[in-house]
Image: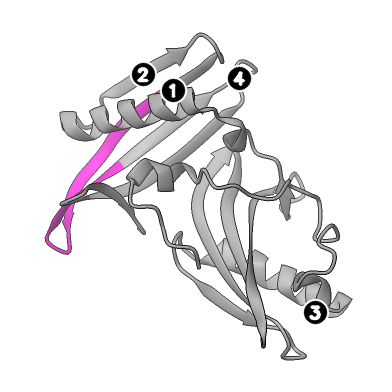
Amino acid sequence: MKPIATAAFTSLLCVLSLPAAASNFGFMRDTLPSQLAADEMQALKTEIARVLEQTADKKVSQWQSPGGKVGVKILPKLSYTEAGMPCRRTLLQFSAASKPAETYGFTICKNADDKWHITQSRLQSLGEEDLALIESHALQALNDNHTGNPITWFNPKTKINGTAVLVSAAQKNQRPCKTLAISLFDAEGVSLEGQYLLCKTPSGWQREAF
């Protein structure tokens, strides 16, 4: 897997360069995913859905194709809700003997039928200015130590409202840790919301798995 970025909110917002979203995996021609037979691809999709339902962020799950040719590591990196529906930013790393590994990133959300599907999330369209606003206000909420006190902002250029709230504080592995809730609302009123555990390290706040 690619290493997790050391900056807490760079990692938090997953600003990776990723392939364009699609409704299925059919666009990947001449790649390791294309070597999977139809039944193997269906088995992989079933496993991805299971992982998204049961596995916490930053925990790697491994899947091997029934034919044994292709292995896949599944890493949910970021969980949040968009317009009230659960979404998870997820990395898939495909590997096979004598071939370089291939890593793909997707936003996978539930639809009205309660099924996981690849989608283009509003999170992926956030610009550098909005990312900087999220980081600065989130750090303010972390450092102010005022539990339940909302830190709000508004970007007049993009019409995005944001709120960061310190939910709780506790010790984890002898380090000070805090749970932070972040909410964004765009001009259409669509929300992006999530809660994240961050712990203090010598290099700053780092996101941890719950």
Magenta stretch contains residue 67? no
Which amino acid type is shown beneath numbered disc 2? Thr
Which amino acid type is shown beneath numbered disc 3? Glu
* Marks 3 & 1, CB-CB < 8 Å contact: no
Point 44% across, 22% down: residue: 162
> Mark 3 highlights which residue?
40
* Marks 2 & 1, CB-CB < 8 Å contact: yes
> Mark 4 highlights which residue?
189
Q: Indicate whether 202 appears above or below 60.
A: above
Q: How far is disc 3 from disc 2 in space, using C-alphas?
A: 47 Å
Q: Where in the figure is residue 61, as x and y percent of width and height?
A: 53, 74
Q: Residue furthest left?
A: 174
Q: How far is disc 4 from disc 1 in space, using C-alphas?
A: 12 Å
Q: How far is disc 4 from disc 3 in space, using C-alphas?
A: 40 Å
Which amino acid type is shown beneath numbered disc 4? Gly
Residue 152: which disc?
A: 2
| Mark closest to the chain's N terminus, 2 or 1 | 2
Point 49% across, 56% down: residue: 77
